[in-house]
Image: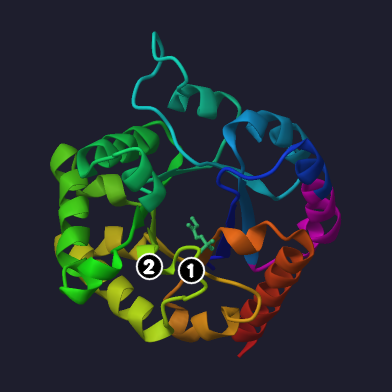
Amino acid sequence: MKKFLIIANWKLNGNLKFINKNINLMTKKIDNSLSFCNLSIAPPYVYINYINNFLKNTSISLTAQNVDIHLQGSFTGETSIKMLKDIGIKYVITGHSERRLFHNESNNLVSQKFILIKNNGLIPILCLGETEEQKKYNQTEKIFIQQINNIIKNSNINILNKTIIAYEPVWAIGSGKNANFSEIQKIILFIKKYISSLNKQVAKNIYFLYGGSVNYSNINTFFKKNIINGFLIGKASLEIENFIALVKKTEKIISLLNRS
Ligand code: 13P
């Protein structure tokens, strides 16, 4: 059974006080109560190994928000995949729209990162999302295929096996306006169909997440037909009591779906 994956992307937020409180509450209130969900946290880099020490004997994993393409050397300010592997990080995000926008990350760079993450035994999370403008001009599918093809071209189709693709419409991130289920379903099925046309088994082994204004009140709307395998959550993961409630509600919904 595929577990539902919930990733808290803290982006550039938090401090030691926030982290101590959040980790303490998560380990006490969620860790032992999850059977149908996996929880992962993507904190700012400076805190990642500090948190890692607290999560050692728990079921909660860590996700890196970014990685450099170099393994070591004179690259001031960067973090390598070897370092992430060294401390036991499980997932690494690549292609997040905030990195594409604010750090000029191209499809090519995102591909290089994706391949590097996968080839080093960590699980890449490829974020794909269209802007309002791209949506208006029906470019979503075209730009997603370009990114996927770029990865395959620099490696091969098997590089996508057992990885994660997160659909995160740019217009939905932090806006309070989530994509509705049928929009998400259309995109996920489109990507699945495309990858399936290249390799059926690889397509089956991909996890699909949705991110973009997911919160406690709207999660009920996302669970139909097993299309979405998890959430990537920004803002709603910063309010710890609400986030714990969101995770517990998700666990309950998934457990009921598994029984029916
Ligand atoms: P919000 O949940 O704040 O919309 O952010 C989504 C996101 O970017 C997760 O990576």
Mark 1 within 8 Å of ligand 1, using the beta carbon? yes
Quickly name the residue at label 1.
175
Left or right? Give the position of 42 relative to 158: right
In this picture, which residue range is highlighted in magenta? Answer: 22-36
Asked if residue 228 lies left or right of residue 35, the reply is left
The percent coordinates of residue 58 (x first, y second) are 75, 46
Give the answer, above or below, for where 20 lies relative to 174: above
Q: Is residue 226 magenta?
A: no
List x then y, in percent, for residue 147: 21, 52
Q: Residue at x 22, y 44 (%)?
A: 107
Q: Quadrant of residue 108?
A: top left
Residue 171, numbered label: 2
**Image quadrant where residue 247 sits:** bottom right
Amino acid type at circle 1 is Ser
Location of residue 228 by image quarter: bottom left
User: Where in the figure is residue 30, as x and y percent of width and height?
Assistant: 78, 60
Name the spot of residue 106 as percent of width and height, x first.
Answer: 24, 41
